Image (cartoon, helix red, strand yellow):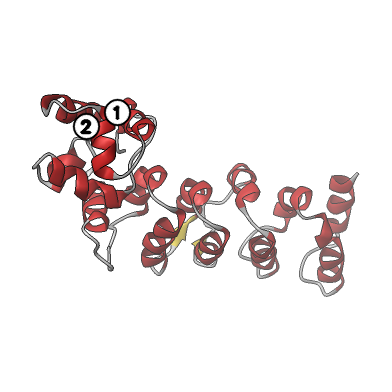
């Protein structure tokens, strides 16, 4: 995983070795001195578009700047291509995206993830990225999730990040038999409005009558 503290230390050394104040560097980048201070402490990371400017200012390669944060090879490729303005970045794994997700905008993470979604998305992959994605991106990934490894603990961690549409997608997967009907227990506290849909599903024989008992227990 990309180490912002190592990156910040490297940036600080570059600035000091160039006999430059934080304010002077901030002026060159058109940002605040406080932002530079935050980068150097490792508390935050510059927008990837600024990385190219930093590399130019200190006359180093973009690769050297990115590698100062000790990224994995996959993470370095993603950051380098985004910073260079590539429109078709092709990540090799969800792990690489998750490793640098805190450094990227939600829209960028969504585009990167969408490129891998066609290969199938394990529930653990979605959980690793959910807090960094917007609702639309979460919904798209959820449509491609394979639930072979799902359990109540994983679903409980994921549910708070889902909007109403995504919760409906989970419920539909229960009706389609892709998920055990007992997962209603996890879904209901976040979607009590689904009680009428659960009742209808029981009547239609899509889920067993015991689901009504479970539903009443959860509501009480």
Taking the image as shown, residue 41 lies to the left or right of residue 10, namely right
Q: Say which quarter of the image contains residue 170.
A: bottom right
From the top left corner, tell me how far across and down residue 173 is, in percent: 64, 66
Callout 2–callout 1 Cβ contact below 8 Å: yes
Name which residue lies at 48% across and 49% down. 132
Name which residue lies at 31% across and 45% down. 30
Taking the image as shown, residue 193 lies to the left or right of residue 54, namely right
* Disc 1 crowd, CA 10 A, few/some/many (<14, 14-19, 20+): many
Quadrant occupied by the N terminus: top left
- Whether residue 73 appears in this view of the structure is no
From the top left corner, tell me how far across and down residue 46 is, in percent: 33, 42
- Extreme residue in the bottom direction: 204
Query: Image height check: is 64 above or below 175?
Result: above
Query: Image height check: is 205 above or below 74?
Result: below
> Which sits in the foreground, 95 or 106?
106
From the top left corner, tell me how far across and down residue 22 is, in percent: 27, 29
Which numbered circle lies on residue 40? Answer: 1
Q: Say which quarter of the image contains residue 138.
A: bottom right
Quadrant occupied by the C terminus: top right
Taking the image as shown, residue 121 lies to the left or right of residue 220, namely left
Name which residue lies at 71% across and 48% down. 186
> Which sits in the foreground, 160 or 3?
3
- Whether residue 104 appears in this view of the structure is yes
Q: Regarding mark 2 in the picture, which secondary structure is present there?
A: helix
- Residue occupied by mark 2: 11
């Amino acid at each position: 995983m990309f180490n912002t503290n190592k990156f910040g230390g490297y940036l600080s050394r570059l600035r000091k070795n160039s006999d430059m104040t934080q304010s002077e560097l901030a002026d060159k980048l058109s940002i605040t001195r406080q932002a530079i201070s935050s980068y150097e402490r490792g508390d935050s990371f510059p927008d990837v578009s600024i990385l190219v400017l930093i590399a130019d200012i200190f006359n180093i390669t973009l690769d050297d700047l990115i590698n100062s944060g000790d990224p994995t090879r996959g993470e370095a490729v993603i950051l380098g291509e985004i910073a260079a303005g590539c429109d078709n970045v092709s990540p090799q794994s969800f792990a690489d995206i998750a490793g640098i997700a805190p450094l990227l905008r939600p829209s960028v993470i969504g585009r990167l993830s969408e490129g891998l979604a066609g290969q199938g998305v394990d529930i653990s992959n979605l959980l690793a990225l959910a807090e960094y994605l917007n609702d639309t991106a979460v919904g798209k990934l959820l449509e491609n999730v394979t639930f072979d490894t799902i359990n109540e603990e994983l679903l409980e961690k994921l549910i708070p990040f889902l909007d109403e549409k995504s919760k409906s997608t989970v419920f539909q997967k229960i009706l389609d038999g892709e998920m055990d009907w007992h997962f209603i227990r996890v879904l209901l506290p976040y979607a009590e409005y689904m009680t009428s849909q659960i009742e209808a599903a029981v009547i239609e024989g899509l889920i067993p009558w015991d689901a009504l008992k479970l539903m009443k227990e959860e509501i009480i």
